[in-house]
Image (spheres, rainbow, N blue to C red):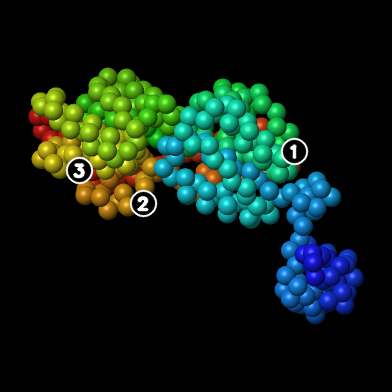
């Protein structure tokens, strides 16, 4: 055979009509089990693969959702994508993945989105970590539903998004330290070009202001290396060492713990440490890390569920998921006299 096998070839091999083959392929319940078995055997023997492009043209449905990843500070991306893939499959969709890393231009982003729409995707999820991406999407009409994941502070009420409430998570972390009695709480931030870092700064500052507490703010980049470096800077201040540190994420907190160990600063006896994300293994650091848990798989699932509803005709929606504080052994009340 000089061409790929088609539906008519399967029908001849199985001794049935092409309509019966179509019903088997599409899971129609009216086909008798023995007929279904013959058709499936013929499909296997001939190596038939359905022509998804032709099917999309005929039905005007591709059963595909595009996912665009924009940014380089997305540490928990695998868990987000797992949630996306799981929810899409359950809803009967495939996922077409594209990415633009670093400081992509608006033109780069639009080119990527256009390539997905050229594939007849039915909706697009944009996983973004910085404002420029959202600004580029605001007011843009692609002809398919679009939802931003991990956005935060979306400027357009017409743009759908799903995010974990980062500011609330930061407030939970700082409130926990305040309730323990801390009044000098430093914040080692992530990269402030990102949504998450900015929102966590806002939450930290809001809780300090509400409680008349204080604390230095030092900017890092979400890496363990930056947490390590900034913790050494805090130690270099000598007697001004804070009684607690709120790290921009768990990676940074890991660097903080290492630096404090080098300096002989005991956690939590001398300084309490809180992270953010509840990364895998956070409970096995020494000491086990108190942190703010984000359910990244749930985030991915929620984005797909939102897009499926929008494909069905629902309007743009904005959804914030609630994080949860996980208290472990890296936090305690400040020692007497500190």
Q: Is residue 39 above or below residue 67?
A: below
Left or right of 261 on screen, residue 201? right
Residue displayed at 65% across by 52% down: 94
Dot 1 crowding, Cα within 10 Å, few <14, some 14–19, many 20+: few
The residue that label 3 is drawn on is: 258
The residue that label 1 is drawn on is: 313
Q: Quadrant of residue 263?
A: top left
Which percent across, then down, holds residue 175? Answer: 32, 32
The residue that label 2 is drawn on is: 280
Residue displayed at 41% across by 42% down: 75
Work out how far the residue at label 3 is from the one at label 1, CA to CA, in angstroms. 52 Å
Does dot 2 land on a helix, a strand or a loop?
loop
Which percent across, then down, holds residue 52? Answer: 75, 55
Residue displayed at 58% across by 31% down: 108
Dot 2 crowding, Cα within 10 Å, few <14, some 14–19, many 20+: few
Q: Quadrant of residue 234?
A: top left
Which percent across, then down, holds residue 186? Answer: 25, 28
């Amino acid at each position: 055979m000089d061409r790929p096998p088609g539906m008519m070839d399967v029908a001849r091999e199985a001794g049935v009509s092409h309509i019966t083959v179509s019903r088997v392929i599409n899971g129609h319940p009216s086909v008798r089990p023995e007929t279904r078995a013959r058709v499936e055997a013929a499909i296997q023997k001939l190596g038939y693969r359905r022509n998804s492009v032709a099917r999309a043209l005929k039905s005007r449905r591709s059963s595909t959702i595009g996912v665009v990843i924009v940014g380089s500070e997305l540490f928990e991306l695998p868990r987000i994508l797992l949630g996306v893939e799981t929810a899409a499959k359950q809803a009967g969709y495939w996922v077409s993945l594209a990415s633009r890393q670093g400081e992509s231009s608006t033109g780069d982003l639009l080119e990527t989105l256009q390539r997905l729409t050229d594939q007849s995707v039915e909706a697009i999820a944009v996983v973004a970590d910085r404002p420029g991406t959202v600004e580029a999407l605001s007011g843009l009409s692609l002809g398919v539903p679009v939802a931003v994941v991990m956005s935060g502070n979306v400027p357009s009420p017409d743009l759908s998004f799903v995010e974990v409430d980062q500011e609330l998570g930061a407030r939970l972390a700082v409130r926990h330290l305040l309730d323990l009695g801390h009044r000098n709480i430093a914040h080692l931030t992530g990269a402030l070009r990102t949504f998450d870092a900015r929102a966590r700064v806002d939450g930290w500052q809001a809780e300090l202001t509400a409680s008349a507490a204080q604390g230095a703010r030092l900017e890092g980049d979400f890496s363990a290396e930056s947490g390590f470096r900034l913790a050494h800077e805090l130690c270099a201040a000598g007697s001004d060492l804070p009684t607690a540190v709120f790290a921009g994420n768990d990676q940074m907190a890991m660097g903080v713990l290492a630096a404090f160990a080098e300096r002989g600063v005991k956690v939590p006896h001398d300084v309490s440490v809180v992270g953010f994300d509840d990364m895998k293994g956070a409970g096995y650091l020494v000491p086990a890390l108190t942190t703010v848990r984000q359910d990244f798989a749930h985030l991915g699932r929620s984005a797909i569920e939102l897009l499926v509803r929008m494909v069905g005709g629902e309007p743009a929606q904005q959804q914030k998921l609630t994080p949860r504080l996980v208290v472990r052994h890296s936090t305690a009340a400040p020692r007497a006299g500190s």
